[in-house]
Image (cartoon, rainbow, N blue to C red):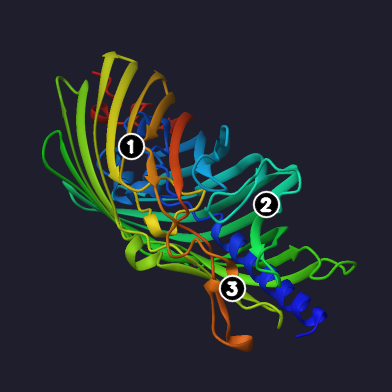
Amino acid sequence: MSVRGRTCRGGVIALAALLALVAARPARANPEPPANYDARVAAMGGAAVATANNPSALFHNPARLDQIERFAITAVATSLLVNLQAPFAGPGTEQESGLIYAPLLFLGGAGRVHERVVVGAGAYVYTGFGGGFRNVDCIANGDPVDCEAPDSPYRIDPPADQEVTLFVAEFAIPVQVKVHERVSLGVTLRLPWGRQDVRAHQDINNSNPDTPFLGQAEQTLSGFGIPGVLLGVNVEPIDGLHIGLAYRSKVWVNLDGTTTTPPLVPGADPLLVDTSTRWDVPHMLRLGVAYTTWRDRLTVTGEFKIQFHDEANEAQVFELDNPLAPDTRAEFRWKNVYFGNLAAELWALPRWPIRLGVTLARSASEPETLTPFSPPPGIQYGMYGGFGVLAGPLQVDMAFGWGGGPAYTRTENGALCVDADERTEGVGARRTLTAQGGCAGTYDVDSWFLSLSATFRLGAEEGGSESESGEP
């Protein structure tokens, strides 16, 4: 083979591997934070399917909109802060991302149009993730390499950030109907939209297997998805006892855009490749029970939910509109997430509630497909708390919390932690490159939540129903 042919072949592999890296980077397992809308819900660790009492119910269980007397509007700002630890060049090269900030926003309103019917509208960020690892100076496949040597082919000089931004937002229209004095049904129509931005390096073998090619790719994708529904039921079999059940249908977001890679050969222009893929949001089932007692001052609640990632998130395929580059496949192989929590709300004073919640869940991550942006496999847990104040028709709440779990250590590289040519299958235009994952090293994650929300109500008692406001 000629030198030019080897260079072209190396460039093709380099391009493909860079694009596979882009495909893999935003794939955080469990991309749905448990402590979200509103701050009351966040303070109780996400327990909402049997307790939501304002327009945030359109996100959790639309049947709970029956708690709205006449009209209510809710605004929520949640700050998600994440610190990741992961290796970029094998064991001993672990580094922390530093606090990664992702805003999660909600705005929704709902009003009663009939004594048995409530309708509304809302918009919210469903999944939010942003930031990355700062000043990464060495990237390799996981085998020990000399990153300190000035002429090391694995060095990034000057060091560069590995950055990811991914979010999925939804516009939602809920309808709730009370079919019996103690039974309400609800449905929320959901229209998703997403955006993904990536800027990252990867180590890739080119025509010379002893000399890796290290380059950077930049990617911007966005688009709308297939509409879905959220179905809910709220039952009050006896006074003070609420049972909530909600089912969320699977939706997917079609993402289109471009990926820019370094020149395939020295002196050439950067390559701009049209790219398309889709991001799947899985089916989910939630069951919750809440009991209010002590003159409506104390509510205790528990919730269990399943996110069916096993069916939805086997892999993500990126289609590349360029004959030089094969399609790329980011293997996830995520497992179903089983999530449970216990929480309590106490109105210590007539207008001052305090709240606590704890959570326990299984991570969706699969050890063989771990990336630096994946939380470790195994058990994840969290602790949450918060308080509020009720002032006539206005209620303001604040919440804070932490979530994490034990670090996970891989002592050996997995089957996907190999050079790019070993992860490429097929011939010609029908080739597929699988993204790198499962490299040796220690992986860890810590998450912090800070949420602030405000709800304004107009109703018969200018503060919601007596049992739900907590005011005796």
Which residue is most to the top? 349
Discs 2/1, front: 2
Discs 1/3, front: 3
Q: Kindly identify the residue that appears in the image at 51 percent across and 35 percent down.
A: 83
Nearer to me, 19 or 38: 19
Tag 3 residue: 421
Are the residues at dot 2 and dot 1 in contact (C-beta closer than 8 Å)?
no
Q: Quadrant of residue 327?
A: bottom right
Q: Quadrant of the N terminus?
A: bottom right
Is 157 placed above or below 190 here?
A: above
Q: Earlier in the sequence, mark 2 or mark 3?
A: 2
Nearer to me, 359 or 437: 437
Q: What amino acid does circle 1 point to?
A: Asn
Where residue 460 sits in the image (x, y, percent)? Answer: 34, 31
Q: What amino acid does circle 3 point to?
A: Asp
Q: In the visual, does 361 lie left or right of 88?
A: left
Q: Quadrant of residue 188?
A: bottom left
Q: Kindly identify the residue that appears in the image at 57 percent across and 37 percent down.
A: 97
- At numbered mark 1, what does the secondary structure look like: helix, strand or loop? loop
Q: What amino acid does circle 2 point to?
A: Tyr
Q: Kindly identify the residue that appears in the image at 32 percent across and 49 percent down.
A: 61
Tag 2 residue: 154
Is 177 placed above or below 384 here?
A: below
Q: Give the spatial CA distance, label 2 vs label 3.
A: 17 Å
